[in-house]
Image (cartoon, rainbow, N blue to C red):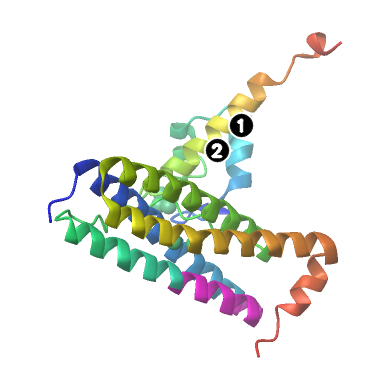
């Protein structure tokens, strides 16, 4: 099915964000593992895999609309040097994705492309969940202090 | 945070460069951020711009009194 040009471009922009997110979470996962924060590492690994699933769906949609998925382009990957900074970057990244998906819902609705709208709405709930997680972690750090928080992030069951 | 992966340059170094009034070209010659694969350039530009704007919008001493 031939998709609208502006929808394919918006999907590609989303794809760029998903590919960036995969890498950002992945490097944070490996850094936490290296520092010995196994539980934190596990969280970031799961998030990275989740973003890969998102990218998978976006690529599928672009191909279905007979567009070319842009696997070349990526936004700058910001690498947090501490766990707290990594969580701040997660919050920044997820709030960007939430905004992007809200825009895509509106664009797809106006273009009468309800398949893309459905995909965007579905993805939106995931990203909101991720954003909520990052916000909660930063809130907990404020409450209990970074030392107590990190102590909880060492052991992975 | 690390902004330039090719040369391992942090946002702090870039902010310091911005305060010295360095441009993208200056930074490419100095700490070398953005001078290899160019992948970090949008982020480098953003930091330089942000910090210059902040510097300019700070009221001068006499205006503050
Ligand atoms: S990441 Fe900065 S030049 Fe490659
Ligand atoms: Fe995502
Ligand atoms: Fe996400």
- Secondary structure mostly seen in magenta is helix
Q: Secondary structure at mark 1?
A: helix
Q: Quadrant of the N terminus of chain A?
A: bottom left
Residue positioned 80% across, 14% down in the render:
B61
| Magenta stretch encompasses residue A30 | no
| Magenta stretch encompasses residue A42 | yes
The answer as to whether the residues below labels 1 and 2 share one chain is: yes
Q: Position of residue B18 (x, y in %)?
A: 59, 33
Q: Position of residue A71 (x, y in %)?
A: 27, 59
The residue labelled by disc 2 is B47
Could you tell whether A138 is left or right of A57 in the image? right
Depicted A36 relative to depicted B11: above or below:
below
Span colored in magenta = A33-49
Q: Which mark is residue B51?
A: 1
Tags 1 and 2 touching, CB below 8 Å:
yes
Q: Position of residue A4 (x, y in %)?
A: 19, 44
Rate crowding at label 2 as few (under 14), some (14 to 19) or many (20 or more) other CA atoms within 10 Å. Answer: some
Q: Chain of mark 1?
A: B
Q: Position of residue A83 (x, y in %)?
A: 66, 66
């Amino acid at each position: 099915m031939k998709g609208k040009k502006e929808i394919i471009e918006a999907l590609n922009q989303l794809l760029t964000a998903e590919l960036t997110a995969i890498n950002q979470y992945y490097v944070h996962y490996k850094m936490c593992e290296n520092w010995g924060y196994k539980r934190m590492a596990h969280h970031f690994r799961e998030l990275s895999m989740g973003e890969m699933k998102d990218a998978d769906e976006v690529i599928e949609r672009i191909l279905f609309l007979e567009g070319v998925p842009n696997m070349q382009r990526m936004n700058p990957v910001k690498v947090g040097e501490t766990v707290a900074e990594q969580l701040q970057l997660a919050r920044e990244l997820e709030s960007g994705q939430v905004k992007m998906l809200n825009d895509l819902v509106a664009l797809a609705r106006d273009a009468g492309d309800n398949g893309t709208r459905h995909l965007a709405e579905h993805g939106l709930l995931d990203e909101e969940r991720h954003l909520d997680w990052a916000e909660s972690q930063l809130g907990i750090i404020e409450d209990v202090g970074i030392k107590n928080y990190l102590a909880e992030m060492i052991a992975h069951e | 945070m690390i902004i330039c992966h090719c040369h391992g340059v942090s946002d702090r170094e870039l902010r310091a460069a911005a305060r010295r009034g360095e441009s993208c070209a200056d930074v490419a010659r100095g700490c070398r951020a953005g001078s290899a694969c160019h992948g970090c350039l949008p982020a480098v530009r953003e930091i330089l711009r942000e910090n210059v704007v902040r510097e300019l919008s700070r009221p001068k001493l006499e205006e503050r009194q």
